[in-house]
Each structure stands twice: as structure tokens, then as C-alpha cells.
Amino acid sequence: MSVPLEILIFKQVGQQMYESETDNLIAGRSGQDSWRGWLGHGLKAVLPPVFCLVAGIIVWDLVIRFGNIDRYLLPTPWAVMDVLLGRSGDLLCAAWITFCSALTGFVFSLVTGLLVATLFSEFRWFRQGCYPYAIFLHTVPIVAISPLIITWFGYGNRSVVVITYIVSLFPIITSATNGMLQASGELKELFQLYGASRWAVLWKLKLPSAIPQIISGAQTASGLAVVGAIVGEFFAGYEAGQFGLGYYIFSAQGMFRTDILLAAVLLSTLLGIGLFALVTILASTVLRRWTIR
């Protein structure tokens, strides 16, 4: 007994609809499970630091209240919060000035460091002759040469940028040079076998293989750039009524205003974190595919 064609078509369509609904249900459950897993992982990563922060603030406040500590030596966290809110305009303006100085010095050091590292990797005689002076520049205390920099460049943002540039230059030179020199020897031989030029070896082999170390050096230099900007503002950070966070820290210390000092230190820390995060985001997006896998 033959089955009518209409019944066969109906069964086939029903089977397809059932399979489609089953796939959608499984996909929906998988998506919900992945979303829940991501949310749980995020909470596990965020909750411990938040808990430690809240506990630290509570301990800080209790120590001041029951330890008979003078408020000019250590203010309460709420006093620091009052300064952040009450002087938010001045502090944010100062933070912006410091950030611009740090970013400018960092960018100049990044460009110069990559150029110098390229010369070091390409010319052995140049590396042997000049690398010791790069180490010398790194070991000279920046506080000791700050008066000399001010004498040459004057007070204001220009000297701050120069100090930031000097402080953040060496990590980039070191990391980029090591990365380029550690390019795969087998790949170098392969490039030479196909008659690649020196420029092609540099651009398509040495530089891409050095990117992870360049990123690491740039992350280190980004933190040092904020330190250099703050130190520079201790000595030369005022020009035409523009004051950075370093000047606020220096002035607050002289007036025993530790609440202002701690507020400026907190903003300085956030600036360092922000510049570090900016470098990390650029590295994970712009340079993600330009590496040897």
C-alpha cells in the first residue's frame, strides 16, 4: 500500500521543523550558559578587588578614629572624597595638563626608541658604540639633571615633556632591540634563500617578531611617563597659571594639606592606569594581527 505524496511531504516538513526548533533550543541554552559563565567569571574577577578596597577604606577610617591620629598627618577617606568633589574642576584640569605632558613625552620616546632600536639591530658597531650611553642616560637620576633641563628649556610644559621623554625612553629601546635581535634564525635563512632585501627582512620579519616585546616595553614606559611628568612638575610644572598634579602635590605638602595631596596622588595613579590601558587596548586591536604566529 503506497503512501500518498501529500503525507510524505507533510512528514518531511514536520521533521525539518522539529529539527530546526531543537537546534534553536540548544543554541539558546548554549547562549544562556555562555552568558551566565561570562557573568560569573566577571563577578569572580571584580568582587575580590572591590571587597579589598571597601575593607581597606573601613580600616583606614577606623584607624584614624580610634588611633588618635592627627588629621593633618592622615585625613579620613571622606575628607579626601570631599576634596575630590569640592575641587573637582581644578583637579581635573591639573590631571589633564599632566596627562598631556605624559602622553607627549611617551609618544616622542616611543618613536625615538623604535628608531634607535632599529639602528641597534641593523648595525652591530652602532649598538656596541652607543648602547652603553643609553644605559648611562637611564642610570642618571632624573632629579639630579632636572635643574639642568630647566636651565636649557625654561620653566613650564616644555621641560616637563623633556623629563618625561628621558624617563620613558630606555625601556622602549631595550625591549625593541632585544625583540628584533631574537628573530628566528631559520626564518632569516629562509629570507636570505629567497633573496630578500635588508629592508624586507627588517619590515616583514624582525619588526613583527619584536612586537610582543615592544608592547611590553611600551606598557612599562607608559607608567614611567606619568612618573616623569609628576617629577617634572615638581620643579618646572607651572606656566601662565597652568598647574599640573605634580605642582598640586608639591604645594599641598608644603601646606600640610594631606587631603589635597592624597587626592592628587589618587588621580595620578588613575592617570598611570589609564595610559597603561590605552597602550594595552591599542596593542590588542591595531597590532593584534601583525605578529608571527
Image (cartoon, rainbow, N blue to C red):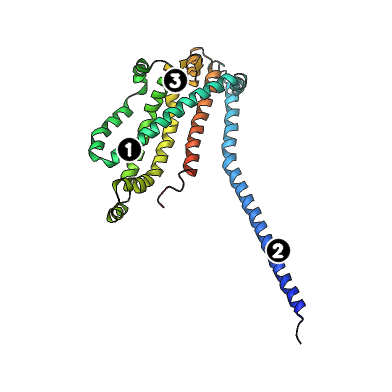
Q: CA distance from mark 2 to mark 1?
A: 59 Å
Left or right side of 275 for 113: left
Q: Helix or strand or loop: what does disc 2 sit on? A: helix
- Between residue 85 and residue 215, name the one nearer to us: 215
Left or right side of 221 for 189: left
Q: Is residue 226 visible?
A: no
Q: Residues within 10 Å of mark 1 (few under 14, many from 20)?
A: many
Left or right side of 152 for 75: right
Q: Helix or strand or loop: what does disc 1 sit on? A: helix
Amino acid under label 1?
Ala
Would you place residue 175 above or below residue 184 in this image?
Answer: above
Tags 2 and 1 in contact by the CB under 8 Å rule?
no
Would you place residue 264 above or below residue 222 in this image?
Answer: above
| Image spot of residue 273 (x, y percent) | 50, 33
Would you place residue 85 above or below residue 22 in this image?
Answer: above
Q: Identify the image quadrant of residue 86.
A: top right
Amino acid under label 2?
Glu
Instruction: Please give the residue where the numbered disc 3 appears in the rendered image.
Output: 157
Badge number at residue 117: 1
- Between residue 179 and residue 85, name the one nearer to us: 179
| Image spot of residue 42 (x, y percent) | 59, 44
Please tell me which of labels 3 and 2 falls first in the chain.
Answer: 2
Please tell me which of labels 1 and 3 falls first in the chain.
Answer: 1
Mark 3 or mark 2, whichever is nearer to me? 3
| Image spot of residue 222 (x, y percent) | 44, 32
In percent of the image, x 26 and y 37: which residue is there? 127
Q: CA distance from mark 3 to mark 2?
A: 65 Å
Instruction: Please give the residue where the numbered disc 2 appears in the rendered image.
Output: 21
Q: Residues within 10 Å of mark 2 (few under 14, many from 20)?
A: few
Amino acid under label 3?
Asn
Please tell me which of labels 2 and 1 falls first in the chain.
Answer: 2
Quadrant where the image shows the N terminus:
bottom right
